[in-house]
Amino acid sequence: MSVAIERLKQWRENPVQFVRQCLGIEPDDWQAETLMEFTRNQRLAMKAAKGPGKTAVLSWLCWNFLVTRPYPKIAATSISWDNLADGLWTEMAKTQSKSELLKTEFQWTKTRIVYKKQPEQWWMSARTWAKGANSSQQADTLAGLHADYLLFVIDEAGGVPDSVMAAAEAGLSTGIETKIVIAGNPTHLEGPLYRAATSERHLWYLVNITGDPNNPKRSKRISIQWAKDQISKYGETNPWVVVNVFGEFPPSSMNALLGPDEIERAMNKHLREDQYDFAQKRIGVDVSRFGDDRTILFPRQGLASFTPVEMRNARTNEIAARLAQAKVKWGSEIELIDDTGGWGAGVVDSMIQAGYSPMPINFSGKALDNRYFNKRSEMWFMMAEWVKRGGALPNIPELARELSVPTYTFHNGKLRLEEKEMIKERLGFSPDMADALALTFALPEMPRRIDIGPGANTGKLNSEYDPYDDSRLSN
């Protein structure tokens, strides 16, 4: 390698110098701390808020190890191949482009980085496991690697299976210098990152990376205005803020979407008509063809939801006819139909043929708010917030069960509602009623259309309507 031995020794002992001299980058304070602790610790963990530059640090450490150790082997993995390819592996290429030395001496490919003069013995590889792999297959991702200089790098470690981590730990058993570096957002109350910060804290050097605007050691790469905005908008105890702004694990007690007391209060709430009659009338429709699941038509207007219609073993034309009847009788302005599994498509088509304009909603689609993993999670969280803000529910014990059972987790820093099949398994039936109500939150709240004279329908809106105005709530 065309670098003086003395320079390589300096870079090995002081990775901060390597980043400055080889890459031309000035690291932040926490990044410099992490780089230096890499030389002193066998196990290094980064617990990070959103967007501080932790993936960049991972790439700097990998390049430092590749350049300054003889015949090194590095294995990198993440929670998925896409995450690894779009995150750390792309960052490795980006970092290489900043250095003539790295571009000259090393070759980057989509799965491997090699020293050109010793490609078989001097390398870094990108590794992952197939979807649906069992624990043994997952462990094979990092299993069997041994070298005098060996480094395992695990990005988004909060969601990485324990079997993968166990395989990496086995690789530390032999060699001159063997290390593990893990990094991620504190989204899981289990797994490698959580243990490194709790029960296995004595084994790891833990770097806490925060975006807290009041912390002098905060990451400068996280916008202080963005952090203040998130805290102001959602509150500093909000789990999303706890994870993504403060870089801390959320309390385990916060993983229930709604508590029984909140649901009971909503079911005992009585609203005056003037507290909701200016809101848009909506009907959420969860469609089921046959079997144990039910088709539910759930009406809601602003802060008030009303007794849903339940249908079993109904055909799509029957559901559409009943929905059209409800629209005409109640005067709903929009019908939001679950179109996730295909059953809702026939209802949507029948409504269109009848001259109406229903809105198909895909539960697995993209959320409007990037805090949420998908549309389903977003709708359920909006529904839960509505309950907490004073929404009124019909007093139906079955609905109370459906709303109180679901929990949430974090996935790549996003709030994710528990899978429907898991909820169904614990309930003993599908949460169709709650899903139908959640559909009424697929779009932002709107005021209803108002007429300005006999027979007039101008489509004008009451622009001063605030569906969550606290003055409208009853005690």
Image (cartoon, grey):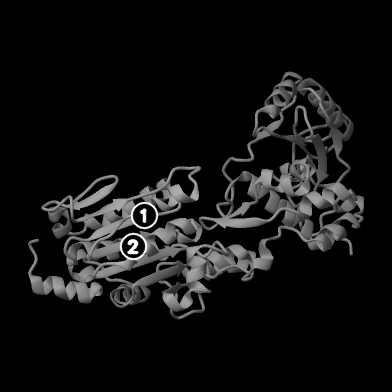
Residue 27: image x %, image y %?
30, 71
Q: Which mark is residue 463?
A: none
Q: Quadrant of residue 458?
A: top right
Residue in the picture at 84% in, 27% down: 322
Q: Quadrant of the N terminus?
A: bottom left
Name the amino acid type tagged 1: Leu
In the foreground, 68 or 324 = 68
Name the amino acid type tagged 2: Gly
Secondary structure beneath dot 2 equals helix
Residue in the picture at 86% in, 59% down: 264
Residue in the picture at 85% in, 47% down: 398
Residue at which label 1 appears: 142
Q: Quadrant of the C terminus?
A: bottom right
Query: In the rendered view, does 227 fall on the left or right side of 424?
Result: left
In the foreground, 299 or 129 = 129
Residue 192: image x %, image y %?
48, 64
Residue at which label 2 appears: 171
Query: In the rendered view, does 65 fall on the left or right side of 5?
Result: right
Residue in the picture at 52% in, 62% down: 191
Residue 19: image x %, image y %?
24, 68
Vertical arrangement, residue 376 with respect to residue 339, above or below: below
Vertical arrangement, residue 46 with respect to residue 366, above or below: below
In the foreground, 417 or 466 = 417
Query: In the rendered view, does 17 fall on the left or right side of 232?
Result: left
| Residue at the limit of the structure toward the top, as seen here | 353
How far apart, in angstroms, are the residues tagged by discs 1 and 2?
A: 8 Å
Query: In the rendered view, does 217 fall on the left or right side of 337?
Result: left
Q: Quadrant of residue 99?
A: bottom left
**Residues marked 1 and 2 touching at CB (< 8 Å):** yes
Category of crowding for the residue at label 2, using alpha-carbon neighbours closer than 10 angstroms: few (below 14), some (14–19), many (at least 20): many
Secondary structure beneath dot 1 equals loop
Question: Does label 1 or label 2 sit earlier along the sequence?
Answer: 1
